[in-house]
Amino acid sequence: MNTTQSPLGLVAGRGQFPFLVVQGAKKFNRSVQAVGFKGHTSPELFSLVDEMTWINVGQLGKMIKWFKKRGVKEVVFAGGINKPKTLDLRPDFKAAKVLYKVRSRNDNALIQAIVETMQADGLKVMSPIKFVPGLLAPIGILTRRQPSKQEEADIAFGWPLAKEIGSMDIGQCIVVKESMVVAVEAIEGTNATIQRAGKLAGEGCTVIKVFKPEQEENIDQPAIGVNTIETMKQANVKCLAVEAGKSLFFDQEQSLALANQADICIIGYETS
């Protein structure tokens, strides 16, 4: 079967990302077979795809069999999974084999093992960006407000640290103030990290969100959007540097309008 004509498999997490991928896939005349996760994926997606099944997180074997039975050869992942909820994971046999092989259950190690397992079963895991290229964060200062000298210094200080923390497969985000690391993201996610930083250090913090070295870019892209800006506003955090060209920026127009209203600076940062 020609893969360009085969159905597209969609592993759908929470949020709007799966919906945007389905819309993009239709522009390529691709039918979509979706797998959703109980307690994570919006049921509204069911009516937009050709066929959809529901599984529990950890049912990797069931997911692979379902895709293969429907002639799927290419699969994209879109949308997050609530990480604290996955701590009560009940893996099926294939997922248990994956967990046995990996050195940790942190993002990179686990995701790479899942990708390798799916590809060994004949399912090519591809980037969803092909279907939503406009979601990538652009380069440059994206808001009206320019970064202050201190914010520029904090980005220069914090960026390599964020990359180093990312290389250890801990998180994608750190918060810095006056060349001090205030908060580091782990399982709680970016918004909770920003909230914690605001409580600890108050105004003057800079959020740095990066693509982790050796990260599986077909699945786990860094993402920001309206909720990120709302959280920054509530925490009185005024600067955000996100890795341009590798991060997803949802609802850009609305997010930038909110940032401008709150005097928040957003930078699409690119390193050579």
Image (cartoon, grey):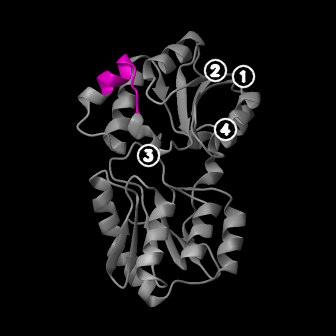
Instruction: Indicate the position of residue 195 as horizontal and vertical percent values.
Output: 49, 69
Q: Residue furthest front?
A: 88
Can you identify the residue that label 3 sits on?
84
Give the numbered dot on residue 7.
Answer: 2
The residues bearing labels 2 and 4 have C-alpha atoms spaced at a distance of 21 Å
Q: Report the mark closest to the observer, 4 or 3.
A: 3
Provide the residue span drawn in magenta.
89-98
Q: Hey, which quadrant is residue 40 in on the image?
A: top right
The residues bearing labels 4 and 3 have C-alpha atoms spaced at a distance of 18 Å
Which class describes the residues within 10 Å of circle 3: few (<14), some (14-19), or many (20+)?
few
Q: Which label's residue is closer to the chain start, 4 or 1?
A: 4
Q: Is 90 a magenta residue? A: yes
The reply to whether callout 2 and callout 4 are in contact (CB within 8 Å) is no
Instruction: Indicate the position of residue 233 as horizontal and vertical percent values.
Output: 60, 75
- Amino acid residing under circle 4: Ser
The reply to whether callout 3 and callout 1 are in contact (CB within 8 Å) is no
Can you identify the residue that label 1 sits on?
50
Q: Is 211 a magenta residue? A: no
SS label for mark 3 = helix
